[in-house]
């Protein structure tokens, strides 16, 4: 692999993102589509761009990512972690900035399983006194 391409993996819930960054004009491609086309919500787009905004590299690096599993929110968070880890390989001086912003920590929360005798994980069936 070329030395000017930096690869990393990010995950959240059931989603996994494989990220490759290289120097460019700030183009972000996810599963063959541009960022705005893939994530239709502005909040998710902001979430993905956070690592670039914090390290002041927005518009300087191109991103090519493959994301699968889970929903759009989990995929966006997985992509964010992958980008942050790739930026760390790109420049090790970013560690302190990314760590203080909490972008290098994997969100370990998972969906709680459904229990028997309940509607969902914790929600109970309606109680009837009579």
Image (spheres, rainbow, N blue to C red):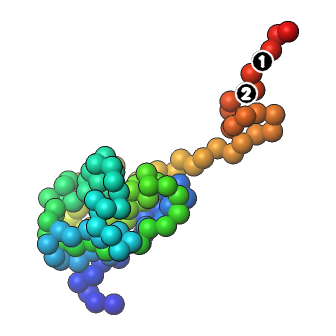
Name above or below for residue 86 compared with residue 12.
Answer: below
Residue contact at pointers 1 and 2, CB within 8 angstroms: yes
Name above or below for residue 80 compared with residue 116.
Answer: below
Please give the name of the residue rendered at 18% of the width and 77% of the height, measured from the top-left corner. Answer: 23
Disc sitting over residue 124 in the figure: 2
User: Circle 2 sits in a helix, a strand or a loop, which is it?
Assistant: loop
Residue 51 place in picture, x, y as percent: 26, 57
Disc sitting over residue 11 in the figure: none
Please give the name of the residue rendered at 39% of the width and 72% of the height, measured from the top-left corner. Answer: 31
Residue 83 place in picture, x, y as percent: 32, 65
The answer to whether any part of residue 33 appears in the image is yes
Please give the name of the residue rendered at 43% of the width and 51% of the height, measured from the top-left corner. Answer: 73
Q: In this orientation, which residue lies closer to the viewer: 32 or 122?
A: 32
Please give the name of the residue rendered at 53% of the width and 47% of the height, measured from the top-left corner. Answer: 109
Question: In the rendered view, does 120 fall on the left or right side of 9?
Answer: right
Disc sitting over residue 127 in the figure: 1
Residue 82, picture quadrant: bottom left
Question: In the rendered view, does 112 fall on the left or right side of 117?
Answer: left
Question: In the rendered view, does 73 fall on the left or right side of 57?
Answer: right
Residue 55 place in picture, x, y as percent: 18, 58
Name above or below for residue 56 compared with residue 63.
Answer: above
Q: Quadrant of the N terminus?
A: bottom left
Gap between marks 1 and 2 measured at Cα = 8 Å
Residue 124 place in picture, x, y as percent: 73, 27
Q: Quadrant of the C terminus?
A: top right
User: Circle 1 sits in a helix, a strand or a loop, which is it?
Assistant: loop
Q: In this orientation, which residue lies closer to the viewer: 119 or 3?
A: 119
User: 10 Å neighbourhood of mark 2: few (<14), some, or many (≥20)?
Assistant: few
Residue 27, picture quadrant: bottom left
């Amino acid at each position: 692999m070329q030395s000017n391409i930096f690869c990393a993996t990010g995950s959240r819930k059931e989603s996994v993102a494989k990220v490759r960054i290289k120097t460019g004009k700030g183009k972000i491609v996810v599963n063959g589509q541009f960022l705005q086309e893939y994530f239709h919500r502005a909040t998710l787009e902001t979430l993905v761009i956070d690592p670039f905004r914090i390290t002041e590299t927005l518009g300087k690096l191109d991103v090519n990512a493959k994301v699968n599993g889970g929903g759009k929110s989990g995929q966006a968070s997985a992509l964010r972690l992958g980008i942050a880890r790739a930026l760390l390989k790109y420049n090790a001086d970013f560690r302190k900035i990314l760590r203080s912003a909490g972008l290098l920590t994997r969100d370990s929360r998972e969906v709680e399983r459904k229990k028997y005798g309940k509607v969902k994980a914790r929600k109970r069936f309606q109680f009837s006194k009579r």
